[in-house]
Amino acid sequence: MAVGSLTVLACILCMVLIQGLADFPFRNTSLSWSDRVDDLVSRLSIDEIQHQMARGGAGTNGTPPIPRLGIKPYSWNTECLRGDVGAGNATGFPQALGLAASFSPRLVFQIGEATGVEVRAKYNNYSRNGLHGKHMGVSCFSPVINIVRDPRWGRNQETYGEDPFQSGVLADSFVRALQGNDTRYVRANAGCKHFAAYDGPENIPISRLKFDAKVSERDLRTTFLPAFRACVKAGTYSVMCSYNSINGVPTCASKQLLNDILREEWGFRGYVVSDENAIENILRGHHYADNYVDIVSDCVNAGCNLELAGVEDNLTYYQMLDAINQGKLTEEKVRGSVKPLFYTRMRLGEFDPPEMNPYSKLDLSVIESEAHQMLAIEAAMKTFVLLKNEGHILPLKRDTFDRIAIVGPMANDSHLLFGDYAPLSPRPLVKTPLQGLANLAQSVNYAAGCNDTFCKHYDPVSIKKAVAMTEVIFVCLGTGRTIESEGNDRYDINLPGYQLQLLQDVAANRNETPVVLLLFNAGALNVTWADQSPDIAAILECFFPAQATGEALRRVIINEGPGSNPAGRMPATWPATEDQIFNITEYSMEGKTYRYFKGDPLYPYGYGLSYTQFEYFILENPTMIQAGQDLQGMVSVGNTGNIDGDEVIQVYIQWMNATQPTPQLQLAWFDRLTIPGNGAINVNFTVSAESMAVWVDNKGWAVEEGEMVLYVGGQQPNQKKQISSNIFRVTYKIVGSKFLGRY
């Protein structure tokens, strides 16, 4: 009999048994969660616990049922980065790095909420039909909150950019939205990954499976950990440990990370799951131990509750009984380790009557609902970053042309527009740049110019023919998941293959026709030529906008409707040349990201143009605060143009006389707000005491007495490339000092 049939039969048996087992205390909804979990775990044999902790998903079909207790199978392996991945039709929202470019906690919250609704609806449907397996659960491996520190890293696209503070704010929004606001039940539980200092490489110049990141305590605390702490404070139920080692210790076996920091310092009470095969790889890749008994004892003792394994017969956690028999693990430790898994399942509602759980009412009608389709369009528009707009060519002054050209390998490739870890959107709802922008003209000349984005084989004749006798030319270039993705770094930041030649051929044959360059990528590309060339009128960074790409582009290009005035900002520093990039294996933060970079990038972090202009004209803030107090401020922002637009207000701080090394600049507050044409708003902001704290070696975080600089504006201060709006610069003094703790 097939395995799937056996699983269904086991589920049926579980459902039958449940009717007679309702008197088990762990099913008594009047008891506390802890009492119920204690009762359930006390009834399990060590062999049953071993199965529950060893079968996290991936190469397995999840945890097996326990029919004698009426416990069903469960899948821990669900991907929810920006939509439900790998589980059939789902709304495809823009890739995470694009969402970071929106600088909008509200937008990330809306997408987290929509994702949680669709994931739960599918889970309800699968469960009712006795189906359990990969991507069929409600325990998400999302969000990804690693830091962008090298544009060549293949997984930049999954992150929220280079700034730890911004990443933490957006992670907080996503976690709270995904999990829902019911006081008793969780809609779908978040899982923040990859913990920790997993920020490249994937495969160049060394495999992530054996890479050991050499990280100082200061960089770990000030750059690589803050967003994870924000996730924990937001209430995430899970954290995923990563493939790499840190300073010689694989993260999934690191007591410092998984217990001392995560649980003791931060108070995390959820479960830690390994990345796929990461635990098996402790032996195969890192050679940290020479047998699986030692590895399972190391990982469980460190605090890893669940193994996400690949090939079933190599599951490391199946050596758990041997480890106990050899005295390397205790039964008490193992029983304690499985409790967060069942606590999570209880909070998801598995052991309660369905009618008690409001999320059990969600059905498949919410998948790709009209509201979610509209949100996908809004989100895509909000991710776009206008990098260049010579002569204010955009928005186009007309919405109908006789003939336009749309060229390039990203113009009509619906697959690559989604990026990695993408939901499967129904094809009729997917609109490519060609399909969307074609609505602007009576006739369209289209030529890809290359077979794919590698662009090793280029047809210049088709490009030159396409751009002839047209009124506007759109050039669609970029990468896609075939060039940058998980397991797939780039060797350099150059436009792939002949893509630059394609762009230059367009410029040479445009005959005064304006050229708009549309970029679809995550890590920065060398477009210095395009930025400086008078032949390229506009550059719009689009990232991977997913299903609504074409429609979102059409609206933004002509400024049609609310939200169509671009206001995205760069979520990572965009280097001008290759020599501004360091060795990807070097984890010192010196010279990396806007916080430590010395030089002039092509596009600074926080940079982005608009169709209108903004002015900051009143700033109110205290000139003196006590150490440990938050700084409360207010700024007035005006839209001095006639076009409604969003402004991203950015508040930075700078330490003037700290006794400890600090970033040269630090984002401390931000938001994205709409300001009507010729209108103004007052914006209240808070710089937290934690943002002002410095890391003191061997001690923890402290707010020191001294002078601080406060910058408030629509961009990062002190940059060679700037937008037109002004930036306030004021100083304030911190009186006294205060130790905030070790975290």
Image (cartoon, rainbow, N blue to C red):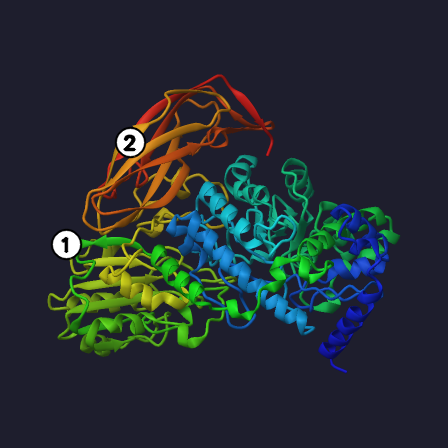
Q: How many discs appear? A: 2
* The C terminus, quarter of image: top right
**Residue 533 location, x and y as percent?**
18, 57
State the residue in front, 269 or 388. 269
Horizontally, residue 88 falls left or right of residue 647, namely: right
**Residue 548 location, x and y as percent?**
37, 66
- Name the image quarter holding residue 281: bottom right
* The N terminus, quarter of image: bottom right
**Residue 425 location, x and y as percent?**
46, 71
Amino acid type, label 2: Phe
- Would residue 3 be seen by someone viewing this image from the given angle? yes
Residue farthest along the right direction in this orientation: 325
State the residue in front, 674 or 579. 674
Q: Residue at x 38, y 51 (%)?
A: 101
Q: Is residue 100 above or below residue 57?
A: above
- C-alpha distance separating marks 2 and 1: 27 Å
State the residue in front, 673 or 298. 673
CB within 8 Å, label 2 to label 1: no
Query: Which disc number belongs to residue 391?
Result: 1
Residue at image mark 2: 728
Q: Is residue 644 above or below residue 397?
A: above
Horizontally, residue 250 falls left or right of residue 701, namely: right
Q: Residue at x 58, y 47 (%)?
A: 196
Q: Residue at x 67, y 74 (%)?
A: 129
- Would residue 150 be seen by someone viewing this image from the given angle? no
Amino acid type, label 1: Gly
**Element assignment for label 1:** helix
Q: Residues within 10 Å of mark 2 (few under 14, many from 20)?
A: some
Earlier sequence position, callout 2 versus callout 1: 1
**Element assignment for label 2:** strand
